[in-house]
Amino acid sequence: MKKQLWLDSRIEKYREDREFKLEGLKLSVTEEICALMEASEITRDGLAKMMGCSNAYITKLLSGRENITLAKLLQISEALGTELKINFIPRGKVKRIKAGNFEYSKFQPAYTGLVGEKTGEYRDGKKKRRLSK
């Protein structure tokens, strides 16, 4: 039980870290590709042949050691007979606005833009913080 609390606190500490998020995305994408391959009974060798690349390259992609480009994701999607869709999900505040008979949502992003491209600072509400590199 104590070990689980320690792990949870570590995960919570890094949850907003860009590298942690990137690794989570890589894992999520590669797991979904593997699940689709298994459901379609497509082997790594079969996917490699459909994509015109080596089996070793597919292994590298699915291990997370290689960054997968959008073009490569589209190629994998087509080989697996699926449609590729990428969603951006708001994490800021969503405000409901009513104007006459119309009602709509206005998204207020958590980050309101870069302050200085060279300095790597941005505004988060009233606070300025440095972007990690």
Image (tube, rainbow, N blue to C red):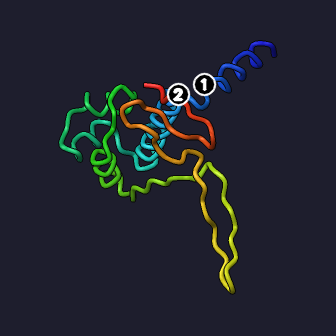
Between residues 13 and 107, which one lies in front from this camera angle? 107
> Which amino acid type is marked by label 1?
Tyr
Secondary structure beneath label 2: helix
Does residue 3 appear left or right of residue 34 in this picture?
right
Does residue 95 appear left or right of residue 71 in this picture?
right
Asked if the residues shown at circle 1 and circle 2 are in contact, with their CB atoms under 8 angstroms apart, the answer is: yes
Image coords of residue 68 (percent x, y)? 33, 38
What residue is shown with label 2? 20
Of pointers 1 and 2, the one earlier in the residue sequence: 1
Q: Which mark is residue 14?
A: 1
Does residue 99 appear left or right of residue 83 in this picture?
right
Does residue 3 appear left or right of residue 15 in this picture?
right
Q: Which mark is residue 28?
A: none
Q: What residue do we see at 60% from left, 59% from top?
A: 107
Image coords of residue 56 (percent x, y)? 25, 27
**For mark 1, does the 10 Å Cα neighbourhood hold few (<14), some (14 to 19), or many (20 or more) residues?**
few
**Relative vertical location of residue 105 with respect to residue 5 in this rendering, above or below:** below
Image coords of residue 108 (percent x, y)? 60, 55
Picture quarter containing residue 111? top right
**For mark 2, does the 10 Å Cα neighbourhood hold few (<14), some (14 to 19), or many (20 or more) residues?**
few
Cα distance between the residues tagged 1 and 2: 6 Å
**Relative vertical location of residue 106 with respect to residue 25 in this rendering, above or below:** below
Picture quarter containing residue 16? top right
